[in-house]
Amino acid sequence: MSNPCILLWLEAPLQSWGADSRFGRRDTLDFPTKSGLLGLLCCALGAGGEQRELLDEMAPLRQTVIAFQRERGERPPLLRDFQMVGSGYDEKDDWEKMLIPRKRDGGIAVGGGTKMTYRYYLQEATFAAAVEVPAARATEFAEALQAPVWDIYFGRKCCAPTDLVFRGRFESEAAAIEAASAIAAEKSLREAFRVRDYAAGDESAGEVVALNDVPVQFGTRKKYRERRVTIIHESNEE
């Protein structure tokens, strides 16, 4: 691998990594997505808007995520948060009236247009992500992650990290993964599974799935394309 890797340590009370969410139901995968980690990187850089050029550079580069746990078979418990959106506003108050959801024709819906949503979070999850980055941008990325322009979070803004996120720049993915294993050992954590970009023959190594998580364009009109990954559980490698 000619490009270096940066190692991210993702540990927090709540994390949420959606790959196929709708307004009324915001699901989370069991692991960080490529779009989620690139969004985190854009926050660190203070890079708003579409960011098509940066995303085009990052799209073909490798990403390997390792999930850690304390006990064999342990899974982060799932939290479901129920929220009401658009309720409780006073139509007689000029400011609150602007916050009431509207119909297509601009009128107020019957009952105020209240929407019910369900949002899902992983609780007390821990991951390491070895992310390949362009050599010319590696220093820029490393500095941004250590002094982010905007707050960084794990999928949603309520998912704040509780440990250092940036854990170093490495010349190979193997070196980054070795460093992640050392951090996990210090915390008495063991590997549960890892998620890597698909390679020919991976069908015998683990579960191959397709994710719509490669961002082509951020901003108000987000666009994504598909990526195949292989999920390898710890028991598969023993």
Image: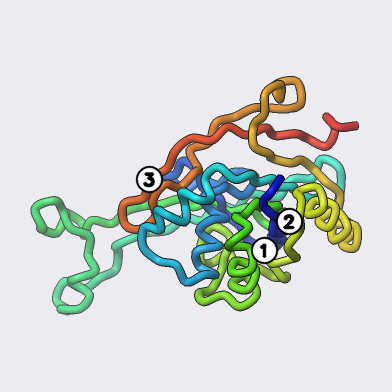
State the CA–CA distance, disc 3 to disc 1.
29 Å
Q: Secondary structure at mark 1?
A: strand
Decide if residue 10 is on the left or right side of residue 37. right
Of pointers 1 and 2, the one earlier in the residue sequence: 1
Residue assigned mark 1: 13
Residue 137: image x %, image y %? 58, 62
Quarter of the image where the C terminus is located: top right
Residue 172: image x %, image y %? 76, 50
State the CA–CA distance, disc 1 to disc 2.
9 Å
**Circles 2, 3 touching at the beta carbon (< 8 Å):** no
Q: Secondary structure at mark 2?
A: strand
Q: Name the one closer to the observer, 191 or 82.
A: 191
Q: Which of label 1 and label 2 is nearer to you?
A: 2
Q: Is residue 29 above or below residue 98?
A: above
State the CA–CA distance, disc 2 to disc 3.
28 Å
Residue 159: image x %, image y %? 58, 64
Residue under the point 69% across and 53% down: 129
Residue type highlighted by circle 1: Pro
Residue assigned mark 3: 223
Q: Name the one closer to the observer, 23 or 203.
A: 203
Residue type highlighted by circle 3: Lys
Residue type highlighted by circle 2: Thr
Q: Name the one closer to the observer, 209 or 61.
A: 61
Disc sitting over residue 126 in the figure:
2
